[in-house]
Image (cartoon, rainbow, N blue to C red):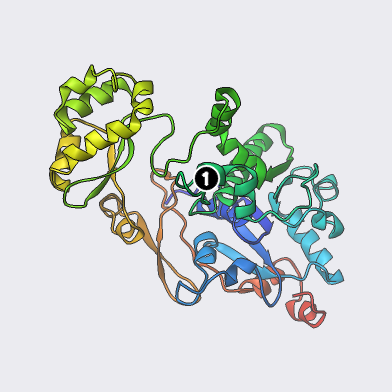
């Protein structure tokens, strides 16, 4: 079997929660060896977020397969030598300590790279290493609020946070892609680099269209549930039998197809209320009433058949149990079994596929499971370190 793209790359990560673990799990998916440094006794605090997966945290199981867990008390004097040895053989060092902690522990980018010019470091923080918010608490909801995501999510009556940790995921993906770019750059230059990624910067980037809309349009885009502030018809509609389908008619060509096939009202194409995208938005309420009247006469199957025949963009609004049984996932065999300390679980395969190379789907580690083996590999006596309280 062919090796994975990151085979031979070693990542040392002082990580917890979501953003940094997501970045390193994607690196592990592609073959990197990830040594996850955890606090003795409690470990990554995401281990205790919930107990829904055979008594384990859903967040932790999602984010930490294919890693080696090494417990190390970084405040212990004996830990410094261990970290130095690990970093000497590492390609990448990731940390998401609170601001200033890495420097107090002697793990700031500048000092550890001074003798390791090929090392790539990646610091994941809430707001970045400078600025008035540098030391502010930066949990995902707080970042969603500060970046304005909450202001554009939800219904007209009530804002809402996104149902997934969008700020954490955004930062994790930028850390992942940044590390990949740094590894590529090192192949050309022979030098590593010091990357910084913040949750706030990541989510503000994702807020691009609303920020342009508000900055240049004069008003922020309204909250519209599953609808869209600048496109209509767009959002969830209900057939006569209660089936919910989501429409996304995004241009005049699709609008014409919708009029012909979905509602069988070709006269709407030239109706001045609906003839252009902007007119449809202005007359959204009237348009939706007209559509609802037609859809109420159709079953979900009949409506879906019409939409499919017209090649009109649509989807089912599925609940999570439905997603687990999604025919697209089933047909493409997108689940694999992953071992965990409490038993096997079904996990989705990595989104990045490499032809001819099976994805890496190794176990989720127990806390400190690999401590003794890794310390022995790097020339340390685990029992001696344990007596000193370092592991």
Q: Residue 352, how many percent across, how many down?
A: 45, 45
Q: Quadrant of the rendered structure where residue 77 is?
A: bottom right
Is residue 191 or residue 335 the one in the foreground?
A: 335
**Residue 74, percent from left and from top:** 79, 67
* Left or right: where 16 falls relative to 222: right
- In the rendered image, residue 55, in percent from the top left (x then y), is placed at 49, 77
The residue under the point 38% across, 46% down is: 356
- Which residue bears the numbered disc 1? 5
Q: Quadrant of residue 211?
A: top right
Residue at 28% over, 31% down: 287
Image quarter hosting the C terminus: bottom right
Q: Is residue 127 visible?
A: yes
Which residue does the image show at 59% across and 51% down from the upper left?
168
Q: Is residue 278 above or below residue 47?
A: above
Which residue is nearer to you in this view: 382 or 253? Answer: 253
- Relative to 114, is 161 on the left or the right? left
């Amino acid at each position: 079997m062919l090796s994975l793209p990151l085979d031979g790359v070693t990542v040392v990560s002082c990580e917890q929660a979501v953003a940094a673990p997501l970045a390193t799990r994607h690196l592990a998916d592609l073959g990197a060896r990830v040594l996850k440094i955890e606090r003795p006794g409690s470990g990554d605090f995401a281990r205790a977020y919930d107990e829904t997966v055979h008594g384990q945290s859903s967040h932790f199981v999602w984010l930490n397969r294919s890693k080696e867990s090494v417990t190390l008390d970084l405040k212990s004097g004996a830990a410094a030598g261990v970290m130095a040895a690990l970093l000497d053989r590492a390609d990448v060092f990731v940390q998401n300590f609170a601001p200033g902690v890495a420097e107090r522990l002697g793990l700031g980018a500048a000092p550890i790279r001074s003798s390791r010019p090929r090392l790539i470091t990646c610091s994941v923080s809430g707001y970045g290493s400078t600025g008035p918010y540098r030391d502010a608490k930066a949990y995902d909801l707080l970042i969603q609020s500060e970046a304005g995501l909450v202001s554009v999510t939800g219904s007209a009556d009530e804002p809402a946070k996104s149902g997934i940790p969008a700020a954490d995921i955004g930062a994790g993906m930028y850390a992942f892609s940044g590390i990949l770019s740094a590894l590529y750059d090192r192949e050309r230059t022979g030098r590593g680099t010091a990357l910084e990624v913040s949750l706030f910067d990541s989510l503000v980037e994702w807020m691009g269209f609303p920020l342009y809309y508000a900055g240049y349009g004069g008003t922020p885009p309204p909250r519209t549930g599953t609808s869209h502030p600048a496109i209509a018809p767009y959002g969830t509609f209900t057939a006569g039998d209660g089936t919910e389908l989501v429409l996304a008619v995004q241009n005049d060509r699709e609008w014409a197809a919708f009029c012909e096939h979905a509602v069988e009202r070709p006269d709407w194409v030239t109706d001045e209320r609906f003839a252009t995208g902007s007119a449809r938005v202005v007359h959204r309420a009237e348009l939706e009433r007209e559509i609802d009247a037609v859809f109420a006469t159709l079953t979900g199957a009949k409506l879906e058949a019409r939409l499919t025949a017209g090649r009109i963009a649509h989807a089912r609004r599925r609940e999570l149990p439905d997603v687990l049984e999604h025919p697209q996932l089933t047909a493409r065999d997108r689940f694999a079994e992953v071992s965990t300390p409490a038993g096997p679980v079904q996990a989705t395969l990595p989104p990045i596929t490499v032809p001819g190379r099976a994805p890496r789907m190794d176990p989720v580690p127990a806390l400190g499971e690999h401590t003794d083996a890794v310390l022995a590999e790097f020339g340390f006596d685990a029992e001696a370190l344990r007596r000193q309280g370092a592991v």
